[in-house]
C-alpha cells in the first residue's frame, strides 16, 4: 500500500484494513492555519495539497536579512504553534532538490541542501513524479 492509493485497492491488498473517519472540518481548519501562517511571510506559494506547498523564499530572506536556516526554523516554529502540528522543510534551488531533501531526511528535523542563489522549501512529502524523474535520470 502507499499514500494516495484508492481505498478499494488498499482493501484488496489488505482485507483486514481498518479505516478511520475523515475529519474534513479539522483538516480544513489546520490547512487554513498553515496557509495563513505561510502567507504572512510570502505570497509566492504553490499549493500541492491541503498540507504541502512549495514556497519561493528569496524575497522574504532578503527582506528579513536572515539565513535560510533561521528563516525556516522561525516558519516551522510558527506553523507548529498555529496548527498544533510539526512540519518538515527541505531547502534547495529547485523543486526536485527540495522534494528529495524533504523525503530523504527526517520529516521533523530541519535539514538543508547546499544550493546556489534561490531558496525554496517544501512542507512534507516527496511527490512521486519527482521520485520518478530522479530515478529515471539517475
Image (cartoon, rainbow, N blue to C red):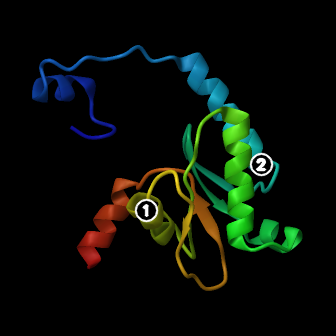
Residue 112 location (% of width, % of height): 55, 71
Taking the spot 47% from the left edge, 60% from the top edge, the residue there is 102
Place residue 62 in its image quadrant. Answer: bottom right
Q: In the displayed structure, does residue 77 sit left or right of residue 133?
A: right
Left or right of 107 on screen, residue 118: right
Foreground residue among 45 and 105: 105
Quadrant for the N terminus in the image: top left
Q: Residue at x 56, y 37 (%)?
A: 50
Query: x, y (%) of residue 108?
Result: 51, 51
On the image, numbered disc 1 is attached to which residue?
Answer: 105
Image quadrant of residue 22? top left
Mark earlier in primary sequence (2, 1): 2
- Horizontal side, residue 4 vs residue 85: left or right: left
* Label 2 SS: helix
Crowd rating for badge 2 (residues with CA inside 10 Å; few <14, some 14–19, many 20+) = few
Where does label 2 land, which residue? 39
Amino acid at each position: 500500500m502507499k499514500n494516495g492509493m484508492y481505498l478499494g485497492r488498499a482493501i484488496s491488498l489488505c482485507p483486514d484494513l481498518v479505516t478511520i473517519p475523515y475529519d474534513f472540518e479539522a483538516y480544513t481548519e489546520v490547512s487554513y492555519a498553515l496557509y495563513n501562517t505561510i502567507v504572512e511571510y510570502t505570497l509566492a506559494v504553490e499549493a500541492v495539497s491541503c498540507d504541502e506547498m512549495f514556497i519561493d523564499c528569496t524575497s522574504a530572506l532578503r527582506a528579513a536579512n536572515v539565513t535560510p536556516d533561521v528563516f525556516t526554523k522561525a516558519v516551522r516554529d510558527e506553523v507548529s504553534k498555529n496548527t498544533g502540528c510539526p512540519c518538515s522543510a527541505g531547502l534547495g534551488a529547485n523543486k526536485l532538490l527540495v522534494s528529495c531533501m524533504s523525503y530523504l531526511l527526517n520529516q521533523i528535523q530541519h535539514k538543508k541542501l547546499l544550493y546556489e542563489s534561490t531558496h525554496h522549501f517544501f512542507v512534507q512529502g516527496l511527490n512521486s513524479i519527482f521520485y520518478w524523474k530522479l530515478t529515471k535520470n539517475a
